[in-house]
Image: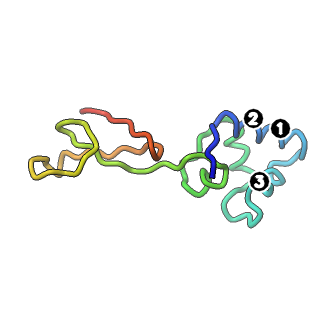
Amino acid sequence: MKHTSFKSIQSKLNKQYRHLKSWRKVANEYDKSGKVLSGAMIRMVALGRDPKHANIRRVLGLPVYAMVVTCSKCGKLHRVLKTCDPKLRIYHRDLCGRFAIKKR
């Protein structure tokens, strides 16, 4: 599945809302079962709230977030070595495929 940008999803949702006149109908265009998306969630996304839940991002075609572990000593992503203290690991939530590394 091809991932799209958040801004393009926002503009697409607003365009569909102007055409369909209902957030619930826009949600049904993406999720026919109605179990993942609601009209309220679509409205929040269209107004600029970035969804964090993986199922919502997947249905909308956005890349999914993942938890990654970085070494606090060197700040890089690698296997935890014996020299690395497991208490010092830093967990980051970022998009799959792109990792932001923060140092303490």
Question: In the rendered structure, are the residues bearing label 1 and label 2 in contact, judged by CB atoms less than 8 Å apart?
Answer: yes
Taking the view exactly as shown, the residue that stands out farthest to the left is 83
Question: In the rendered structure, are the residues bearing label 1 and label 3 in contact, judged by CB atoms less than 8 Å apart?
Answer: no
How many discs mark residues in the rendered view? 3
Q: Would you identify the image quadrant in which residue 76 lies?
A: top left
Marks 2 and 3, how far apart in space?
14 Å
The residue at the point 71 percent across, 39 percent down is 46
- What residue is disc 1 on? 15
> What element does badge 1 sit on?
helix
- Expressed as whole percent of the image width and height from the top left, the position of residue 7 reads 66, 33
Say which amino acid is labelled 1: Lys
- What residue is disc 3 on? 27
- What residue is disc 2 on? 11
> What element does badge 3 sit on?
helix
Of marks 1 and 3, which one's residue comes earlier in the chain?
1
Name the side, left or right, on which 73 lies relative to 76: left
Say which amino acid is labelled 2: Ser
The residue at the point 14 percent across, 51 percent down is 81
Name the side, left or right, on which 87 lies relative to 30: left
